[in-house]
Image: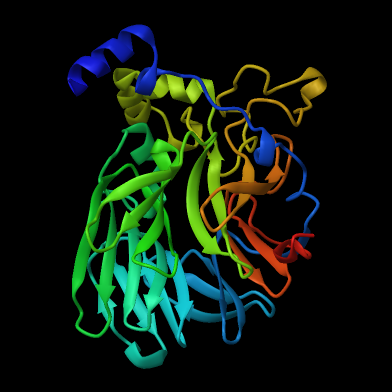
Amino acid sequence: MSAIRRFIDRRLGRGEAAITVPVLDGPLLPNAGLDEAAEVALLTYADNLVVTGKGLVASSGPRVIRVETGEEIAAFDADVSALAYGKGMLAVGLDGKGVKLRGGAHDGKSFATPKNPSALAFLDADTLLVTEGASQRRATDWRRDLMERGQSGALWRLNLATGEAVRVLGGLAWAGGVAATGSQKVWVSESWRHRVLSVDLGTGKAEPVLEHLPAYPARIAPAVEAGFWLSFFSVRNQLVEFILREPAYCKRMLAEVPEPFWMAPALASGLSFSEPMQGSQLRRMGVTKPFAETRSYGLVLQCSPQMKPLRSFHSRADGQAHGCVSAVEQGDDLFVASKGHGKILRLDGAARGI
C-alpha cells in the first residue's frame, strides 16, 4: 500500500511529493531578535555551545574555546562536531572519529562507534546519548546528505562504564540533535523530515511530537525553568523542495557544481555573486529585503516540556546571524552560536522569558 500511496502522491503532488512549505507564523513569527542580540565573541565556525563548571565553552573547527577569555582548552585531530557536559565530564564528538571524554570518572575513554556524531547528551553519570547524522557522511557533509535524501542517521546509547555502544534507532533522515527528558523517552530531531521525535530508549519506538516544521531542526538544549531550546540549520523554501524531488538534477548538481554554489540550504549566503539566485531574493538597488527568499537564516525556538512551540528568535534574510545550530542557557541569558557568521550571541534575560 505504501508504494501505491507514493505513486499517487507523486501524481497529485501531495504528501512527500508536495513542494509547499509551512509559513513562519504563530510562535515562529519572524522578528529581529538574533540580530539585536549582543555579540559576545567572534569565532570562526562557531558551533557547539555548552556550560561547564568553569564557564561557557564553544567549539571552533578542531578546537574547544572558553568563550569569556578566548582561551583554547583543548585541540583535536578532527573537527569537533558535538559537545556535552555533565558530572564533571566533557564529552567531545569528533567528525569521522567517534567520541572522547575529558575529565570526571571516565576521563580518557573513547568510542570509535558511532563514527560521525552530530549531537551529545548525558542521560546519567554512566550513559551518554549520541546522534549520528548519517552513518556514511561526516557532520560537515550535511548538505550533501540532504540533497541525496539520506536516511542513515541513528540514535546511540553509550555505556561509559562498560564501553558498550548500542544503536537504539536507525533509518533517520539526519539525526541532528538529542535531549534527555528525565525519563526513558528522549527527544531526537530528524532534520530532513522537519520534525522532532519522542524515542523510547527501552523499545526504540519513535513517535513524532513536533511535525511539519518550516525549517531544518538541529540540536536541542534543555531550558532551566523546564522546556527546551531547538536550533535550526536554515529555513525551507519551495525551490529547494522542488529540486529535492528531481534526483537526476540533484545528482548532476552535486557532481558538476562546487558545493558553495549548490541550490541548497546554507549556513550563510550572499557571500559571492556566483551564488544561485532565487525569486525575490535580490531587490531594487541590490538591497535584500528581510522578507525575501533566502538560502540561509537564523532561527532558535523555545519549546515547552512537551515540545510545543512557545516563542522564537530570528535573523531574517537580510540579517547577519544565520546558521544557528547551537543554543544554551547560562544564568538568565541565552547564548547562541551563529556558525554562518562566526558569532557568539547573548540574548539578555531570554532564559527568564524576558
Q: Is residue 245 toward the left or the right of residue 5 in the image?
A: right
Q: Is residue 293 toward the left or the right of residue 35 in the image?
A: left
Q: Residue at x 65, y 51 (%)?
A: 341
Q: Nearer the viewer, residue 354 or 239?
A: 354
Q: Is residue 29 toward the left or the right of residue 226 in the image?
A: right
Quarter of the N terminus within the rendering: top left
Percent x, y of residue 304: 58, 55
Furthest residue in direction bottom, as rendered: 105
Q: Nearer the viewer, residue 277 or 299?
A: 299
Q: Relative to residue 342, is residue 351 depicted above or below? A: below
Q: Nearer the viewer, residue 259 or 25?
A: 25
* Residue 185 in view, yes or no: yes
Percent x, y of residue 123: 38, 73
Q: Is residue 170 toward the left or the right of residue 260 in the image?
A: left
Percent x, y of residue 29: 70, 36
Q: Residue at x 32, y 82 (%)?
A: 126
Q: Nearer the viewer, residue 21 or 4?
A: 4
* Residue 143 in view, yes or no: no
Q: Relative to residue 292, is residue 7 depicted above or below? A: above
Q: Relative to residue 14, is residue 48 depicted above or below? A: below
